[in-house]
Amino acid sequence: MDIKIYDMTLRDGLQSIKPYPLEIKLRCIDEIFKNNLYYVDYGSVIKENTNKQMLHSDKILEYIKTEFPNTKTIYGILIPDINLLSYDTIQKNNAFSLLCTVDDNYSFNNFNKNSEDNFIDVLDMLETIITFNKKIKKIRIYIACSFNKNNSYKNKLYNYTSSIIDLVKKYNINSDIIDIVYADTFNEINVNILFDVLSLFSSERKKYIGLHLHCGNNFYNLINLAIKMKIYKIDTGLCDIGSCNNVKNKDTNYISTIKLLKFLNKTDTNIKLLEETENKLNKILNLT
């Protein structure tokens, strides 16, 4: 079992709290990159005058390349809308996150179109990035959804997932590079429903799937389910932040990186150093 830890502190974490100046974000970069994590989301492309928490992402990228030129950490940027995709962004980065949804209300609110058209956009973005960047280390496609007892997204999730896998296989890109991440954007998780969705896929196709969950008291049930279903790509974060705007319970944040590593008893990560990093980040961000 080799669970990959995807740290969301600098993107999903910071976007859930107040905006910070660039110098504060760079201090956070310094601390996080000491840990040699597998993957770090460093920021997002944004529309003008929106999501001010994600300002400075271009400068953060330049800083990482200058200060950590030999890092083994994969660092990626979120491109949440096809209108924000540019050749310049594709060339400067080698890891990307894209966003779609199975929910029409969410799609209209965020993309001003229905979810099917939004998904077509994401497939176009995926194919464009694959075409114009031959040094891709990671592309992550987030599917915003929920897993509740009245779940009506099961078939859509299956179809979206299958379409993405079929497309990347056409380009001979394997599951180490492509992640299809189920995000419980509305904080509605029924473990049995999630099990039903994951059971739709063969072991080979489950290699592509990752989870971005706001689990609260459901932590152990959800992680045990992920392990049982051989889902080894998990989004986590530090400092107990990271609640999505659509999450109903604002006290429910993303999975704790440290809690997960301790639970898994992973010996390839210096947990003590990570705890020191979290303490420093709390002080830098004035969260304590």
Image (cartoon, rainbow, N blue to C red):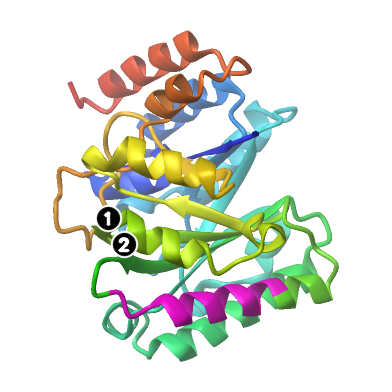
Q: Which residues are magenta?
A: 151-165
x 48%, y 75%: residue = 157
x 15%, y 58%: residue = 248
Disc sitting over residue 244 in the figure: 1
Q: Are marks 2 and 1 in contact (CB under 8 Å)?
A: yes
x 21%, y 58%: residue = 247
Disc sitting over residue 172 in the figure: none
Name the N-terminal-most of marks 2 and 1: 2
> Mark 1 falls on what kind of element?
loop
Residue 99 in the image: state x and y as whole percent: 47, 68
Residue 43 in the image: state x and y as whole percent: 47, 49
Residue 190 in the image: state x and y as whole percent: 28, 58
Please, what is the three-letter code of the amino acid marked with disc 1? Cys
Q: Is residue 48 visible?
A: no
Disc sitting over residue 185 in the figure: 2
Quarter-of-image position of residue 37: top right
